[in-house]
Image: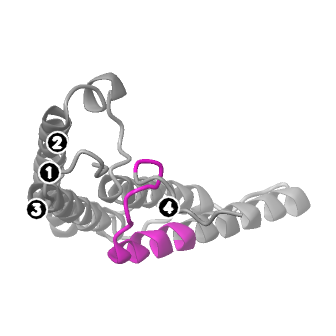
Amino acid sequence: MSTSAPDAEASPAPEPRSLRLEDCLIVGTMAALALVTFANVLVRYFTSASFAWTEEISVFLMIVLALVGGSAAVARQLHIRIEFFADGGSERRRRTLARFGAAMVALLFGLITVLSVRVVWDDYRFEETSPGIGVPQWWYSIWLPVLCALTTVRALQVLARLRGRPSSPRAPL
């Protein structure tokens, strides 16, 4: 029986410990979404009516889930890319493309963060209310700049990690 170490290329890159935040938020959001949806199904089944607030809350939770999941994907470098270009070619080319991708993600989500602050301010200033249950709209929109800022920070962390890593032919990007 042999106890040799696994191949370095076969093992994934170590995960940052700070991703626990995203993982906990994803689990909590999924649990809340399941509970809200299940409550609505039960009410519909037994009363032939539905809670008016469940659709609005469900849409909000799905948006939160997408943004937090996107942040986790960026931090783990699992975001969408064209593998033919991203994984092909020399180590230097792959590293350059990975840096470019991280920089573009940081730029995009940084821009969304800045612009969405204006949306939140307008929702607050003009006292917009949600269409379903009439709560202030900024209760929902405040999470867009917060979660986009989180994705921006994760992309900058990836960029810093890619810049600081010594060049090694066996090191995973």
Residue pointed to by mark 2: 95
Residue pointed to by mark 1: 167
Q: Are marks 3 and 2 in contact (CB under 8 Å)?
A: no
Residue depicted at x 19% and y 37%: 91
Q: Which mark is residue 44?
A: none
Magenta region includes residue 17: yes
Mark 3 or mark 2: which comes first in sequence?
2
Q: Mark 3 belongs to which amino acid?
A: Gly
Quadrant of the rendered structure where residue 144 is? bottom left
**Up/down of 10 relative to 4, above or below:** above
**Neighbour tally class for label 3: few under 14, some 14-19, many 20 plus, Cα within 10 Å:** few
Residue pointed to by mark 4: 61
Quote the CA–CA distance across marks 1 and 4: 41 Å
Mark 3 or mark 4: which comes first in sequence?
4
Quote the CA–CA distance across marks 2 and 1: 9 Å
**Mark 1 residue element:** loop
Residue pointed to by mark 3: 164
**Mark 4 residue element:** helix
Q: Residue 91 versus residue 139: which sits nearer the camera?
A: 91
Magenta residue span: 9-28
Q: Nearer the viewer, mark 3 or mark 4?
A: 3
Q: Main secondary structure of the magenta part?
A: helix
Quote the CA–CA distance across marks 4 and 2: 35 Å
Quote the CA–CA distance across marks 3 and 4: 36 Å
Q: Give how far across and how far down residue 18 sits, in percent.
A: 33, 76
Q: Are marks 1 and 4 in contact (CB under 8 Å)?
A: no
Q: Give how far across and how far down residue 76 sits, in percent.
A: 36, 56
Q: Are marks 2 and 1 in contact (CB under 8 Å)?
A: yes
Mark 2 or mark 1: which comes first in sequence?
2
